[in-house]
Amino acid sequence: MTTAQPLDVQPTPLALLLLGREADPKSERGVECPGDLPSPSDPDLVARARAAKEKLGDKVFVLGHHYQRDEVIQFADVTGDSFKLARDAAARPEAEYIVFCGVHFMAESADILTGDDQKVVLPDLAAGCSMADMATAEQVAECWDVLTDAGIETSVVPVSYMNSSADIKAFTGRHGGTICTSSNAKKALEWAFEQGEKVLFLPDQHLGRNTAVRDMGMSLDDCVVYNPHKPNGGLTAEELRAAKMILWRGHCSVHGRFSLDSVNEVRERIPGVNVLVHPECRHEVVAAADHVGSTEYIIKALEAAPAGSKWAIGTELNLVRRLANRFAPEGKEIVFLDKTVCFCSTMNRIDLPHLVWALESLAEGNLVNRIQVDQETEHFAKLALERMLALP
């Protein structure tokens, strides 16, 4: 009789993906998002997360993006938008571990801006961003070749939205461009047009178009859309030479759902409502809204709003619900702009089970799901980020 040998069972890539310990760079995630929010996790996990975080003490710093669900946000040391959180992480050099409750490009930015001895952890590696995934390094390099063939590359300055991969930020840095947020996009474009005659705006066409037309007085005819899935981006050399804004064909899967019908319907349903939307929304939605601004702008606008005022908000559901609950005691009525509920499905991959797993692993001395940008990419990406920080 032979002795049974222990089985050496290795998890498959699919199993690791489902567990949140592997990424799938070939997929465009987060596009489908109708339905209600996921149900809360096991309440026992709250105690486990609290215990692990207490054991780690000052060694861990937890960042929570505004779009995270409440059960995760409660463990965040700071909350904010992607760039604010990355800067907050850089301001805590004593923290050995930065646990970023957000999505992949945000964790990359935190790694770029923090010290070499700090380790950035993303609780679920499959928490990507569909917008960031819409522009790959290979596609953007091919686009630059198209601009070169059209004879305009020396007059084009790349401006990349914060919601982009480290590779795209590095491309921007290499080619003399800058990064922008939804708060400072106008300043970034003004700077870019002082450097050159044209801008290649990556990867969100809507923020680029809205900033150029709404905030800077350009016309829609000044903008063309480069489609990486078509030969030469679907544009002729003449169209590229005539354009001021070359917009990448990318969008946010959440903000892209809002439509002009959404605005008209909510105005009919709630007389006197103020429509407040994020600039990642489509141009016709932004044009029909009463107020337009970044996530931080939205929060501040509602803080300053008079009691009894009514608001329809065009941004991610978790934030809208949190704001509705926060300001309900002041008599402010806050509703989601679209009748179809939509949350950021990739952001919601960072749930309490994944956060507990990450914190408990760190507390036991096991580094998991580290996000680490290679040195060359970090150098050029940081160059682009520093140009943004130097904007007036």
Image: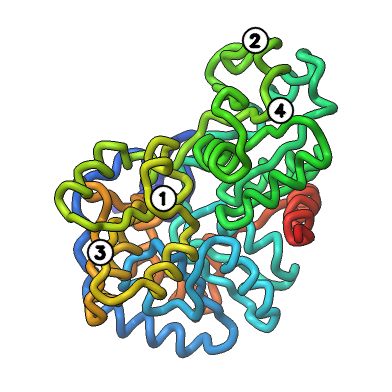
Q: What kind of residue is marked 2?
A: Thr
What's under tag 4, amino acid-wise? Answer: Ala
Q: Residue at x 51, y 72 (%)?
A: 63
- The disc, 2 or 1, on the residue closer to the chain's N-terminal end is 1
Q: Please tell me which of labels 3 and 2 falls first in the chain.
A: 2
Q: Position of residue 321 (x, y in %)?
A: 27, 65
Q: Are marks 4 and 2 in contact (CB under 8 Å)?
A: no
- Determine whether, in the image, residue 3 is placed left or right of residue 198: left
x then y, percent, for residue 318: 32, 62
Instruction: Name the residue beneath numbered marker 4.
Output: 141
| Classed neighbour count for the residue bearing mark 2: other residues with Cα under 10 Å, few (<14), some (14–19), many (≥20) | few
Nearer the observer: mark 4 or 2; the answer is: 2
Residue at disc 4, secondary structure: helix
Q: What residue is drawn where x is 44% and y is 36%?
A: 283
Residue under numbered circle 1: 16
Mark 1, mark 3: which one is toward the viewer? 3
Which of the 4 quarters of the picture holds residue 157?
A: top right
- Dot 4 or dot 1, earlier in sequence: 1
**Residue identified by numbered label 2:** 236
Depth check: give the residue in front, 106 or 267.
267
Would residue 120 be found to the left or right of residue 334 on screen?
A: right
Residue tagged 3? 310
